[in-house]
Image (cartoon, coloured by chain):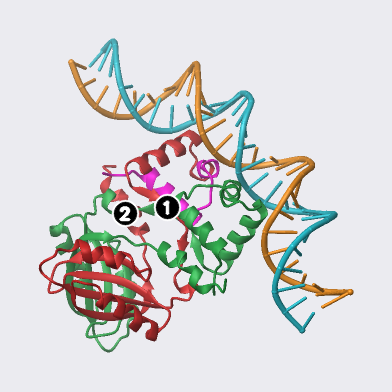
Chain colours: A green, B red, C cyan, D orange
DNA sequence: TGAATTACTGGACAATATGCCTATTCAGCC
DNA sequence: GGCTGAATAGGCATATTGTCCAGTAATTCA
């Protein structure tokens, strides 16, 4: 899976100004409209672009506290039942299974530190969870981004 | 900051089918077009919706390995210079400063385990970084999502 | 209670974008 | 040389956008 410079420029453009239409993109990039259309279709079909969902800020909704919670789970019973229960908690935004001493890593949000305690209590109550450990994200100097990765394409191209 | 049911339904709709236009949204939601337009403007203005960027999958680009790297940094010198250097690494997708024994948590991606070693080496070379510790995300049973949080709005509404 | 403010509706308009099509050119490749 | 995939430039009917407006609830406030 590799993308070329035009793909990269298209993604970068749409990242900067996401509500642009196909026609406007083609003008900005200096290519034909059909090309942009074809590129977008191809990128979506290949799974490079998975969607154009609205990016919602939990903070703007009052969820000011972000934390990472690692879990140890009971050895028997497997991961799945635990995952299902975690997935049912709205404040759990993301769950990974991980290497190392712990078994899972969750990103959670809460309305305050006190609220975080409540959320953690809910997680601890999940059947199969043996132990949890949390760190609070005080600040996020680099918010999630993929652009540099995309912009890095030149390296993958022969030219 | 609170949103009402219509906002929540609108966000949910756009999350499911992101390329819908304003007109189509208004039809689906059974409200006037102007209402949808006004709601979207308001949600954007309030920062609840921060954008409609294309969601790019690092995995589809060949970055199959995701890891979380925690850093301890030198006490003097501050966080900023370290953050700047980390931000310059494309494979570093996210950086948080955190509570606990470590100082920062980074999400990084790489093309393989061997490539991850390379990326970690780059991070270790960052001036100010004293020590790192990594865990690899083996699987992501719950990918990042905000929808449940948004759908939870009923709780915030008097009705 | 009455007045003011705000949000939603339903409609209009010109300007623009979309989806879909075709013919042609250009590049790399067996 | 002949093939294929990709890009271009253009055309066309339809749908959508941005931007107005007037009328109508619903809320807030004095």
Above or below residue A88? Residue C20 is above
The spot of residue B107 in percent (x, y) is: 31, 71
**Magenta stretch: residue B95 in it?**
no
- On the picture, is C19 further left or further right than C10? right
Circle 2 sits in a helix, a strand or a loop, which is it? loop
Chain letter of disc 1 in the image: A
Image position, residue A18 (x, y; %): 47, 50
Vertical order, A39 against D24 (above or below): below
Residue at image point 57% right, 46% down: A24
Residue in front for this viewpoint, A5 or A98? A5
**Mark 1 highlights which residue?**
A54
Name, please, the residue furthest toward the front.
A159
Residue found at the far bottom of this picture: A76
Looking at the image, which residue is at 28% across and 68% down? B86
Tell me where residue A35 sits by quadrant. Answer: bottom right
Residue A93 visible, this orientation = no
């Amino acid at each position: 899976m590799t993308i070329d410079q035009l793909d990269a420029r298209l993604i970068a453009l749409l990242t900067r100004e996401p509500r642009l239409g196909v026609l406007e993109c083609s003008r900005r990039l200096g290519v034909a409209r059909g090309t942009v259309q074809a590129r977008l279709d191809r990128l979506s079909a290949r799974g490079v672009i998975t969607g154009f969902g609205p990016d919602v800020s939990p903070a703007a909704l009052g969820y000011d506290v972000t934390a990472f919670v690692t879990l140890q789970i009971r050895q028997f019973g497997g991961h799945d039942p635990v995952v299902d229960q975690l997935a049912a908690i709205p404040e759990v935004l993301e769950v990974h299974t991980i290497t190392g001493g712990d078994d899972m890593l969750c990103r959670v949000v809460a309305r305050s530190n006190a609220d975080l305690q409540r959320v953690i209590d809910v997680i601890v109550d999940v059947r199969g969870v043996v132990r949890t450990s949390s760190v609070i994200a005080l600040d996020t100097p680099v918010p999630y981004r993929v652009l540099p990765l995309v912009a890095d394409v030149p390296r993958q191209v022969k030219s």
